[in-house]
Amino acid sequence: MDTRVLIAGAGPTGLTLGIELARRGVGCRIVDAAPQPPRGSRGDGLQPRTLEVFDDLGVLDEVLADGAPPAPIRAHLDGEFVGERRMAEHVEPTPDVPHPNPWVLPQWRTEEILRNRLAQLGVRVEAGTEFLGCSQDSRGVTAELSTGPVRAEFLVGADGGRSAVRKSVGIDFVGETDESVRMLLADVQVAGLDPDRGHWFGTAADLARGIAFTPLPGTNSFQCAAPLPDDRDAALPALQRLLDEFSGRTDLRLHDLAWSTAWRANMRLARQFRRGRVFLAGDAAHVHPPTGGQGLNTGVQDTYNLGWKLADGDHDLLDSYEAERLPVAASVLGISTALLRKHTDGHEDAYRRGTETRQLDISYRTGPLAHDERAERGRVQAGDRAPDSPVGDGVRLFDLFRGPHWTLLAFGAEPPETGPDVHVHRIDRSHVDAWRTYDVAAGTLVLVRPDGHIGRITEAAGARPSGR
């Protein structure tokens, strides 16, 4: 069986999985029904934890070079400028969080960067190849593609909210579509608007209605969000009419519409993320409102969690994917939905985003792979994201974690013998930030998983407290 893993869907979720598998030498194929990559900005907000994943995958430099921080938003009510707002205040990096702020990059460019990285690893997306259905047995999955049948050990559906993979294995997609919340989203250029700022035009009588423009880094366009018109007018005239209405101005002209879509509020979660040898990830497993910028980021986290487990193939590891990720997706869906409700209810601070959207606090503490064997636990526990820290000579812990291996940190302890897939590093007392961040006693061993979460913490007999 030449194909270990068949991936249906070549968005950020599927591409992340492809990179994870390819850099481990796992035979995989990635197919997508679209004949060519989409060009819309769509999910243009990258959260701090996703930036850390991209660091590990080797694409962060390009993402940072081509993107930008979220732009401040110039707010107007009834045609009058009422102030400049930020979705969140800028946060300075710390030793444990090197990328604390969200980043903006059009999704088409994020996908382009990921596709190029995948190609460097010897795998190319098979475009124009539609997944039609599948059957499975104890040894593998037979997938029917528009180009013919394919046999694989595992199949991963990363094929979006209308997932053909999810439907083919009969997994329920539970939730609702709120028809009262409908929007027209578009990438468009606007003559007369400052391209370095976001812009919102609304009315004091109904703060839930208005038209917003967010600059798209690396382009001359804005991502526009507006109420979906009731008529069937073409997107550009409809948006121009709404801009005229909400801004009260005649000097702002829209042109060069590059992409548009009608969006309805879908909030849904798959009952299962796995059925036999078939797994779901990204929008195939959960769909979110765009509020909070969680959808793309959660999908990337899904396959960052799944990739190393598929490469290993251990039954218990594969079972842990759903056990770890389904509760996270449910929680994130709750965050996105709550933010959407604040918007539809017209809260004045509905645009504000807190630390809960940055995905740095996602933990698998209660999952089956978290083993914290200390008598007294500190701030950082098994299952948590393993924090960064400088450890001397310009080296950081994230440098040590980078790659498909496990990492064992020995805090003032003699490291034990390990296998070749575990990189061992002794953390001595001179690495003050690491000791402070991990809040451990001398003689503690911290085992970090390939996805940057802590798998196990053990304390040597007679370990001395670190002063916590």
Image (cartoon, rainbow, N blue to C red):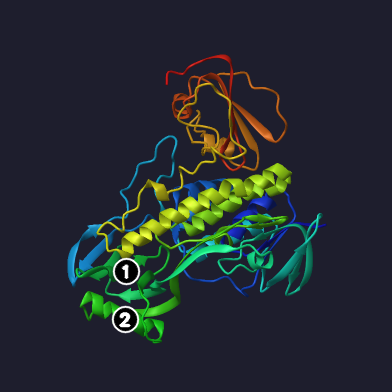
Res 272 seen here: yes
State which quarter of the image contains the N terminus: bottom right
Residue at 53%, 34% (x, y): give it: 397
User: In this orientation, which residue lies closer to the viewer: 306 or 276?
Assistant: 276
**Element type at mark 1:** strand
Q: Which amino acid type is marked by label 2?
A: Gln
Which residue position holds label 2?
A: 240
Residue at 28%, 61% (x, y): give it: 73
C-alpha distance separating marks 2 and 1: 12 Å
User: In this orientation, which residue lies closer to the viewer: 345 or 438?
Assistant: 345
Percent from the top left, x then y, of residue 43?
A: 46, 63
Instruction: Report the disc number at residue 212.
Output: 1
Percent from the top left, x then y, of residue 271?
A: 59, 57
Q: Is residue 446 left or right of residue 380?
A: right
**Quarter of the view holding residue 200:** bottom left
Percent from the top left, x then y, of residue 12?
A: 56, 60
Res 64 seen here: no
Q: Is residue 154 left or right of residue 111?
A: right
Q: Which amino acid type is marked by label 1?
A: Ala
State which quarter of the image contains the C terminus: top left
Label 2 close to label 1 by CB (< 8 Å): no
The first of marks 2 and 1 along the sequence is 1
Instruction: Report the disc number at residue 21.
Output: none
Residue at 49%, 19% (x, y): give it: 429
Category of crowding for the residue at label 2, using alpha-carbon neighbours closer than 10 angstroms: few (below 14), some (14–19), many (at least 20) = some
